[in-house]
Amino acid sequence: MDDIEDDGKTFFPPDRRVGEDRRSLLDRREGDEPPDGQEQRQPEGRRRSDRRVLRFGLLYTMSHPIVVVEDWLNKHCDGGWSLMLEDLDEGLERKTIRVLFELESDKQKFKSMVERSG
């Protein structure tokens, strides 16, 4: 069994593999320094104040383009927001979007706009 040759097609358990081009069995991430010598992330991590929490959300079903809603959000929201497509009908006409807001006041402004536009 010691004279096994690797044809590149047969699976061999790590302890039975031959050849110098095989990856080391050690975890490559265990080293102290990244491969290029520079740490990619900030050592102190993300500061709590840097995070925007989008805790106020709603679903909205519409037939106009999403860009119309995005433009309105850009012009009228004081805080952060996010828009995601939730559902699309078979005719690709009506869509349901989920809109998340950082500020409850922005959510209320959006609801008022929807109610006024009918």
Image: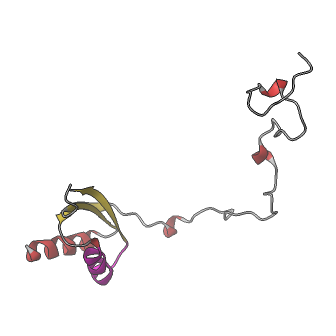
Q: Residue at x 77, y 41 (%)?
A: 27
- Looking at the rendering, which quadrant does residue 106 occupy? bottom left
Compare residues 42 and 72 and report the one nearer the observer. Answer: 72
Q: In which quarter of the image is the N terminus?
A: top right
Q: Position of residue 62 (x, y in %)?
A: 17, 66
- Looking at the rendering, which quadrant does residue 74 occupy? bottom left
Considering every residue shown, the one lying at the far top of the view is 1
Q: In which quarter of the image is the C terminus?
A: bottom left
Task: Tell whether 11 sits left or right of 90.
Answer: right
Position of 50 relative to 72 (above/below): above
- Looking at the rendering, which quadrant does residue 37 occupy? bottom right
Query: How many labels were placed on the picture?
Result: 0
Q: Position of residue 10 (x, y in %)?
A: 74, 27
Q: Where is residue 36 in the image (x, y as percent from the top left)?
A: 80, 63
Position of 90 relative to 16 (above/below): below
Position of 18 relative to 21 (above/below): above
Highlighted magenta segment, given as a residue range? 67-80
Q: Position of residue 12 (x, y in %)?
A: 77, 25
Q: Main secondary structure of the magenta part?
A: helix
Q: Which residue is drawn at 24% across and 69% down?
A: 107
Compare residues 32 and 98 and report the one nearer the observer. Answer: 98
Compare residues 10 and 109 and report the one nearer the observer. Answer: 10
Q: Which residue is drawn at 83% across and 30% down?
A: 6
Compare residues 47 and 7 and report the one nearer the observer. Answer: 7
Residue 88 shown in magenta: no
